[in-house]
Image: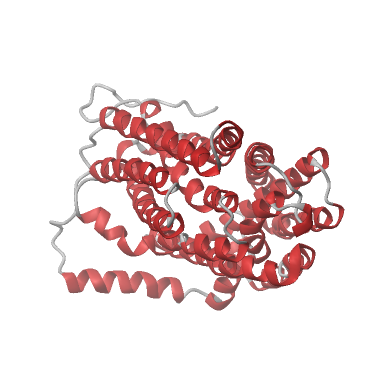
C-alpha cells in the first residue's frame, strides 16, 4: 500500500503550506548562482573582454561556494535563518541593481567584478540559511516530498538566467544604443524581480518555533573549535581519502575547462575559431536547449541509478560525461550553423547531467554519520575548488593553443578522473 502524504496542521502557529515559499525560495537561490558563474562569462565576452581574463576573473567568483562551510556556524548562531534569508535577498537585489549601474562606466570591469564578488558571497550565505530554514519550516515527511519541487525551481532559475535573460540581452542589443545599455537593462530587470522576491518572502516565509539562533548553547569557544576540528578530522580520516579527493578534483576536470569557454566559443567569430553566434542564439543554444537537456540528464541519471544501482552505472555515466565533449571538438573543425550546433550542445549537456548525477551520489554516500551535513559541505567545497582552479587557467590555455587543440585537451583531461574510479572505497558503490 502506498504511503499517504499528510499535510501538517496549518493552524499551528508558525506553519503554512510549503507551496507558498519553497518554490520561490529555491528560485531565489538559483538566480544569483547562474548570473555570477555563467551569465557573467557571456556578459564580459559581449563587452569585448578577452577569454583569458574572463576565465580567470569569473573562476575566482566560485570561491565563496568553496568556503561557505567555514561560516556556516555564524548563520546558526547569529539571528534566525528567516532573518538571514531576508537580509541576504535584499542585499542581492541591491547588488544586481548595482551591477546594472556599473556596466556603463569606463572602469566597468573592476567595479562590476567587485559587485559580482559581493553577490557571490551573499548568495553562498543565502544558500546556507535557505537550506537550514528548509529543515526548520517543513516537517520530515514534507522535506522528502518537496526535494523534487525545490530542485525543479532551482533549475527553473538557471533557465531564467542563462536562457531568458541572455535572450533578452540579445534582443536589447539590436534595439538599444549598444551592448552596455542592453545588459544594463537586463540587470535592472533582474534586480527588480529579485526585489519582488524579497518583498514576497517578507510575507510568505513562516516563523517556525525551532528557527532560533544557537548562540546561547552552553558550549565554550574552545569546545566548539574542538568539535569542528573533529568533524574535519573524521572526514580526512576516512578510508582512501587521497583517492576520494583525487576523484572529486579530477572527475569533472575536462568539463571544468570546457565550462568557461563554451559560450565564448559560440560567440567568437569564425576568424577566431568560433561559431559567430549572436547573443540571442547563445541564449537559445546554451540557456534553453542545453539547460533543458542538462535537467533531463540529471533526472534520467537519478532514475537509472535508483533502478540499476551505482555499481553497475558508475562507469557508463562517467563516460557519458566525457565522451560528448567530442561535440565541441567536431564543432571547432566543422564550424556548423545553429541547425547542427544546437543538437550538439544539447547532447553534451545531456551527458553532463547524466555524469554529474553519478558524481553527486558518490559525494552523498561519502557523507555519513551524525556529521553528514558538514561532511557533505566539505565534499562540495572540494567540488567547487575542482571547478574553480581549472576554470582560472582555461582561458589562457585556449588563447595559447586555439579552440581545436583546447577541445582535444578537454577530451584527454577526462581520463585522470576515470582512472580514480576503480580505487574508490567499496562502501561508496554498495547499493542498499
Residue 322's place in the image compared with 289, above or below, is: below
Query: Which quarter of the figure has residue 362?
Result: bottom right
Which one is nearer the viewer's eye here, 14 or 381? 381
Write the residue at 44% across / 65% down. 378
Answer with left or right where residue 100 lies relative to residue 162: left
Name the residue located 59 percent from the left edge and 63 percent from the top edge: 428
Q: Which residue is at a point 85% across and 57% down the rendered structure image?
A: 333
Instruction: Give the image location of residue 73, x and y in percent.
Output: 27, 59
> From the viewer's perspective, is residue 192 above or below residue 358?
above
Q: In this view, does 55 lie above or below 262?
A: below
Can residue 68 be seen in this snapshot?
yes
**What residue sits 72% from the left and 65% below the top?**
410
Viewer-proximal residue among 355 and 7:
355
Give how far across and how far down residue 177 sits, in percent.
Answer: 54, 36
Residue 343, percent from left and from top: 78, 41
In the image: residue 191, left or right of residue 389: left
Amino acid at each position: 500500500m502506498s504511503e499517504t502524504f499528510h499535510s501538517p496542521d496549518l493552524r499551528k502557529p508558525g506553519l503554512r503550506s510549503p507551496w507558498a515559499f519553497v518554490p520561490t525560495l529555491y528560485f531565489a537561490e538559483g538566480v544569483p548562482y547562474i548570473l555570477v558563474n555563467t551569465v557573467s562569462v557571456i556578459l564580459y565576452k559581449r563587452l569585448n573582454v578577452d577569454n583569458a581574463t574572463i576565465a580567470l576573473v569569473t573562476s575566482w567568483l566560485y570561491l565563496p561556494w568553496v568556503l561557505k562551510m567555514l561560516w556556516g556556524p555564524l548563520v546558526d548562531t547569529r539571528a534566525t535563518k528567516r532573518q538571514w534569508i531576508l537580509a541576504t535577498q535584499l542585499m542581492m537585489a541591491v547588488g544586481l541593481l548595482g551591477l546594472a549601474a556599473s556596466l556603463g562606466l569606463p572602469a566597468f570591469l573592476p567595479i562590476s567584478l567587485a559587485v559580482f564578488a559581493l553577490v557571490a558571497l551573499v548568495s553562498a550565505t543565502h544558500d546556507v540559511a535557505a537550506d537550514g530554514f528548509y529543515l526548520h519550516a517543513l516537517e520530515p515527511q514534507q522535506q522528502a516530498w518537496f526535494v523534487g519541487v525545490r530542485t525543479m525551481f532551482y533549475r527553473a532559475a538557471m533557465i531564467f538566467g542563462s536562457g531568458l535573460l541572455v535572450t533578452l540581452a540579445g534582443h536589447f542589443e539590436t534595439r538599444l544604443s549598444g551592448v552596455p545599455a542592453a545588459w544594463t537593462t537586463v540587470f535592472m530587470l533582474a534586480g527588480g524581480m529579485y526585489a519582488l522576491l524579497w518583498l514576497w518572502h517578507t510575507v510568505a516565509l513562516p516563523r517556525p518555533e525551532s528557527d532560533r539562533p544557537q548562540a546561547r548553547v552552553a558550549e565554550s569557544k574552545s569546545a566548539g573549535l574542538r568539535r569542528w576540528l573533529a568533524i574535519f578530522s573524521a572526514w580526512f580520516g576516512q578510508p582512501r581519502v587521497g583517492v576520494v579527493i583525487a576523484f572529486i578534483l579530477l572527475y569533472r576536470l575536462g568539463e571544468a575547462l570546457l565550462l568557461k569557454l563554451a559560450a565564448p566559443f559560440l560567440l567568437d567569430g569564425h576568424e577566431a575559431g568560433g561559431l559567430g553566434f549572436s547573443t540571442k542564439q547563445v541564449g537559445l543554444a546554451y540557456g534553453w536547449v542545453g539547460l533543458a537537456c542538462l535537467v533531463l540528464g540529471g533526472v534520467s541519471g537519478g532514475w537509472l541509478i535508483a533502478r540499476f544501482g551505482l555499481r553497475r552505472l558508475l562507469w557508463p555515466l562517467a563516460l557519458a560525461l566525457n565522451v560528448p565533449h567530442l561535440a565541441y571538438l567536431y564543432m571547432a573543425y566543422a564550424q556548423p550553423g545553429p541547425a547542427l550546433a544546437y543538437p550538439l550542445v544539447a547532447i553534451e549537456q545531456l551527458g553532463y547531467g547524466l555524469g554529474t548525477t553519478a558524481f553527486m551520489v558518490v559525494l552523498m554516500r561519502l557523507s555519513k554519520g551524525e556529521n553528514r551535513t558538514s561532511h557533505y559541505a566539505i565534499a562540495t567545497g572540494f567540488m567547487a575548488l575542482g571547478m574553480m582552479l581549472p576554470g582560472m587557467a582555461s582561458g589562457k590555455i585556449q588563447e595559447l593553443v586555439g579552440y581545436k587543440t583546447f577541445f582535444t585537451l578537454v577530451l584527454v583531461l577526462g581520463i585522470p578522473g576515470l582512472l580514480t574510479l576503480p580505487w574508490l572505497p567499496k562502501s561508496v558503490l554498495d547499493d542498499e
